Image (cartoon, coloured by chain):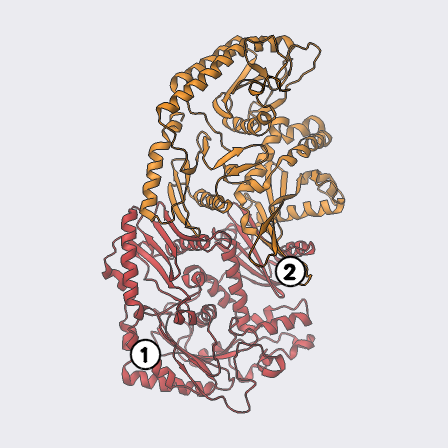
Chain colours: A orange, B red
Amino acid sequence: MLMISPRMASGMQEKQYTPSLLSFFIYNPKFGPREGEEEKKILFYHPIEIEKNEKIRNVGLCEAIVQFTRTFCPTKPAKSLHTQKNRQFFHEPEENFWMVMIVRNPMVEKPNKDGKPPTVEYQEEEIIDSVYGSVLQQCYSMYKLFNGTFSRAFEAGGVELLTQKLEKFFYRYLQTLHLQSCDLLDVFGGISFFPLDKMTYLKIQSFVNRVEESLSLIKYTAFLYNDQLIWSGLEQEDMRILYKYLTTSLFPRHTEPELAGRDSPLRPEVAGNLLHYGRFLTGPANLKDPDAKFRFPRIFVNTEDSYEELHLIVYKAMSAAVCFMVNSAVDLSREFCEQLDSMVGPHLTLLASDICEQYNVNRRISGPEKEPQFKFIYFNHMNLAEKSTIHMRKTASVSLTSVHPDLMKILGDINCDFARVDEDEEIIVKAMTDYWVVGKKSDQRELYVILNQKNANLIEVNEEVKRLCATQFNNIFFLD
Amino acid sequence: MHKSENRGSWEFQPEETLIEDSGEFPSCLAQADLNGQNKDPSAGCAVDVPGPSYQNEDIMSESWRQHRKHVFVLSEAGKPIYSRYGNEEALSSTMGVMMALVSFVQAGGNTIQSIFSDNRTVVFLQNGPLVFVSVSATRQSEQQLRSELLHVYHQIVSLLTQASINRIFECRKNYDLRRLLFGSEKILDSLLDVMDSDPGFMLSAVQCLPLPSSSRDVLSQILQKAVTPNLVFSFLIANNRLVSIVQEKTVLEDARLKPSDLHLLFNLIRASAFQAGEIWTPICLPLFNHDCYFYAYVAYLDPPECTVCLVLLSTDKEAFYAMAECKRKIEEAFASQNALQCVSNTQMSCFDDVGLANLRHFLYKPSNVQEHHRQLPQFTCPEMDVAYRTQDEKIHLLDLYRNMHNRIHSTSRPLKLIYHSAERETLLAWVTSKFEMYACFTPLITKKSAISELTKLLRWIKKEEDRLFICNLPKYSTTPQPGRSSTDRGRSDRQSASDTGLLSLL
């Protein structure tokens, strides 16, 4: 992606190129161990236009690098390769299956006088390994959520089935990667929790219990409000990737028809149904139509032990969304959906407006929200809870931040420093622009605060952060 | 400096002209031996003895893999030249792989820089025909590891000159450079050891011996008077710290000696581990002029303790006796004025009386804005606190400093200040227009106390500035001898190979 930034009095413009995806491939060296068989190792390769021998050479380089690093530490091979022009990330999610992502380094093109070609300056330091390494890992997690593991696919249908699945998934998924806006939040891969009072929380809990009891087919449930999680019955790792899918892919695709105007085409054709605002986000779009075909997406969870394949039913009423997961062996009929709709619809609608009211009441009680003069990011490793007042909107395509990208990279650096040791630490830095950044790690929790107080000294900054901790975190701590 | 072994050199006719006839140019080792002293590692002298040789370590063993930092030097043709641990010949296939990685990436119009894994960093550097690879278990940044490799390159240049290295490989792509570096591996070993434990490399600065400026002036004046044509630098070093440095004015003009060159020079002296007698050796100062040699006369003034070392650099290959004469004059003057008394009296850790209970250690480097620090960047630091007495702990502390240095001097997102409260210590790094400093406090110190102690420390340093740093670099002038004008000027502008005649040394 290209951004123009006007610079200096000379009137000549520098062109800034952000990091972009150069190449992405998946291979297994065991599938083509002998000479002449190299092509068999390659299970997926993007871009597809690359000539066969070049693909083989690139894969060969990765193998050589992994092997070379094994000389010095057999159990922990290479994770990234830095070159002047690009950066390669390596990930072995399953034994002998390797995923490689090649990102072009951000660069600046400076125009030269006298018709000379522009000078290109590569900015290697702009890419933080932990960020893009996490993005690569997430690629695997997302694939696995919808397709199960590589080895299972290989066992079920050999290389053909596996390559088919990889092609189908990654061809689309890679287009959704927006490498220019990846940052610390990608390292965390956290979940935003909705802060609730005890009463409302219990109401939701009992709703879930009741539905699960009445519809015994349901194995797992997850409850979300406004793109934030309230409750989940899934394992943490599975919920984490499902959450990412819901908030960056599924939810953005379905805007709120009940908020649409009367004449809007979004208004559902459910004229007769004034009982509730519930509808299916996956599965039958229109229950009234008996001939309409529908299917639910399948997801794979607990791949480490029980390896379950489930139907993913996502049902929404106003701002509340519930995920019901049913064993995929079951055939979900129209009757079942209607049953679900009539049971859950009205109840969920009521619950949704309850939550909304309660939330507004809480806000009024706690006083006018000190609108985040504090820019911070918080993450709890134990429950994956994440909160950021820096990111303003998280859509499928872009994460808008209200601070300069360099500050976000400083946060990334501090996070890397924290990751080196297990103990609790605190790092405070003053950037060249006189912004202060405070990073605190304590007891599996990380907090990063950015303060725009140019004339403050270390003691004053310390006091500010203490104040922030005392006020802003009570709500979130409740959910621990 | 070394005796090159003419092993079957009649096969390699083109290089004969490059290989020096070592008859009239005794190697420093030979000289030291001639005076009947053998290096005795157990003698409690101040000379740093290089670490044990890992020449024959088994490269398949776990212990070889676990080393903190491997450094490999190979030629563009993939020929092994040096390995810090293990026999480089045994590693030739590993080095072949390294070269293959470099070439492969190069073939794509790109340059390989580094490989990261969870607990190793591999860094590549290519300079001319030589390739350097560092495999490090430390968590140093790529930039720092690369600058260490650059120092290794410069140390090799200091032995051979850059022009010679380039020319050799131009003639023969698969020349075996070990033939010329035979016997010098311990210099590289010593350099790698000292880079870990001396903050001067990270700061690109030299550490001075704290002395009242009047005493230092006395010593400098003595050095200034004992000069001879073609003598361009005189140094006095005590306990591995610089005491005084004087330089020739007209020949060198604005020439500045870079700390990196000094580090290489000091390392050479340290690695040769001689005690009595003198060394007379060619040395190239790569940042000063990477294509020609100076000739260094080195002698300890106080055998057998060997703490005070005199170094005289000349541009004249034949000036050994003139140098020896200068040394004699200096010794006489020192003795008659009892000038070295101040050196043995000096205290290192004199900041104890400032009353900073929580400060364990610090590094302070005045910025290059001030004139004398631009002439010669210096830093000061006390002796290691009791918490960091062992070598491992010392290196641990320096690793912490190095991490902060890396962050604070980042090219894309530099910082002004870092305050890091960790489990075992509290660290602070601060860069201003006037200075750069790193400090280490006890872990439980409050921010208020840290600031207060830091302020007191800065005030104390300001007060003691005269004593802690060399504040002026005295100059003298000698008239170059006629008829040698093209050969004796170590100017920073390039000389052509035929002119100087110095390049024929090899």
Q: Chain of mark 2?
A: A
Asked if residue A363 can be seen in this view, the reply is: yes
Let me know if marks 2 and 1 both belong to one chain.
no
Can you say whether B344 is above or below A419 in the image? Answer: below
Asked if residue B40 can be seen in this view, the reply is: no
The answer to which image quadrant residue A163 occupies is top right
**Residue A421, image x and y in percent?**
42, 43
The residue beneath circle 2 is A112
Q: Residue at x 33, y 86 (%)?
A: B332
Q: Chain of mark 1?
A: B
Relative depth, front residue between A473 and A435? A435
**Residue A79, image x and y in percent?**
57, 44
Task: Indicate which label's residue lies in the foreground, 2 or 1.
Answer: 2
CB within 8 Å, label 2 to label 1: no
Can you say whether B195 is above or below A200 in the image? Answer: below
Q: Where, quadrant-wise, is the N terminus of chain A in this rendering?
A: top right
The residue beneath circle 1 is B217
- Give the structural element (helix, strand or loop) at label 1: helix
**Residue B248, image x and y in percent?**
44, 82
Q: Amino acid at mark 1?
A: Asp
- Give the structural element (helix, strand or loop) at label 2: loop
**Residue positioned most to the bottom:** B482
The CA span between labels 2 and 1 is 52 Å
Q: Where, quadrant-wise, is the C terminus of chain A in this rendering?
A: top left
Q: Amino acid at mark 2?
A: Asn
Relative depth, front residue between B469 and B17? B469
- Marker disc for residue B258: none
Relative depth, front residue between B79 and B485? B485
Can you say whether A446 is above or below A332 in the image? Answer: below
- Does residue B223 appear to the left or right of B456 in the view shown? right
Q: Mark 1: few, some, or many residues within 10 Å (few <14, many ≥20)?
A: some
